[in-house]
Amino acid sequence: MAEPNYSAHNLLVPMVIEQTGRGERSYDIYSRLLKDRIVFIGTAIDDHVANLVVAQMLFLQMEDPKRDINLYINSPGGSVTAGLAIYDTMQFVTCDVATYCVGIAASMGAVLLAAGSRGKRYALPNSDIMIHQVSGGAQGTASDVERTVEWMFKMKRRLIHILANHSGKTEEQVAHDSDRDYWMSAEEAKAYGLVDEVVRSRKDVPAQALPVNGDGVLPA
């Protein structure tokens, strides 16, 4: 018997039904969250995920360039280039981007968590955050391998600079800590400068950082 396929692309996406003046309207759960300016990264980061997240942030920027975007992260990391596409878009948009770690933010996930707007980077109490150096492989001719290794070292330096910039640590400290997997609890990530607050409830998040629906009201 064939094993069931439980990949992210094959799981059932919940639908939300809303009553409107024109009758019922249905959304998939992610579209409904987007309506409240919430973007969710819940898988490893690849080009497909990056394109979706970038598109959502650009849409929210065009819809209202002054209201916050809320980026929730539960990701083990993934592609450096895909993650940097999201990172650059976070810095590009004029909206503040509030980041929230729910579950895990590792590798590129930790970079994106730290890249949120200052004062608006949050972690839930049982979250885990991990930073480490770039990993990968190379094959082909000796020259090809050499160039790939040079590129990996360039990416390593770039990510160290980004993490140092957003955490307030020196590049030397980040390089030392990220030489191997460096795991942190939510409180440890706060002390390190990767998040600003550990929040247990929506009540712990300042009102100005919470998403507001189209009627200018905080969602229940």
Image (cartoon, rainbow, N blue to C red):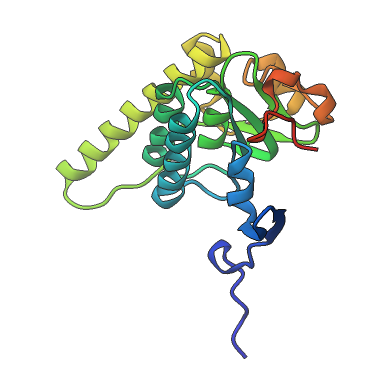
Q: Quadrant of residue 18?
A: bottom right
Q: Residue furthest bottom?
A: 1
User: In this picture, is 5 found above or below 86?
Assistant: below
At 68% across and 17% down in the image, what residue appears?
A: 196
User: In this picture, is 219 found above or below 171?
Assistant: below
User: In this picture, is 37 found above or below 164?
Assistant: below
How many labels were placed on the picture? 0
Which x, y percent locates residue 162? 45, 19
Which x, y percent locates residue 208? 69, 18
Is there any visible trace of residue 44 in the rendered image?
yes
Q: Quadrant of residue 202?
A: top right
At 81% across and 38% down in the image, what residue appears?
A: 220
Of 1 and 149, the residue lying toward us? 1
Which x, y percent locates residue 125? 80, 31
Q: In this view, does 82 lie to the left or right of 21?
A: left
At 45% across and 20% down in the image, what residue appears?
A: 94
Of 99 and 44, the residue lying toward us? 99
Q: In this view, does 128 lie to the left or right of 161?
A: right
At 63% across and 63% down in the image, what residue appears?
A: 13
- Point out the image quarter for the N terminus: bottom right
Of 204 and 46, the residue lying toward us? 204
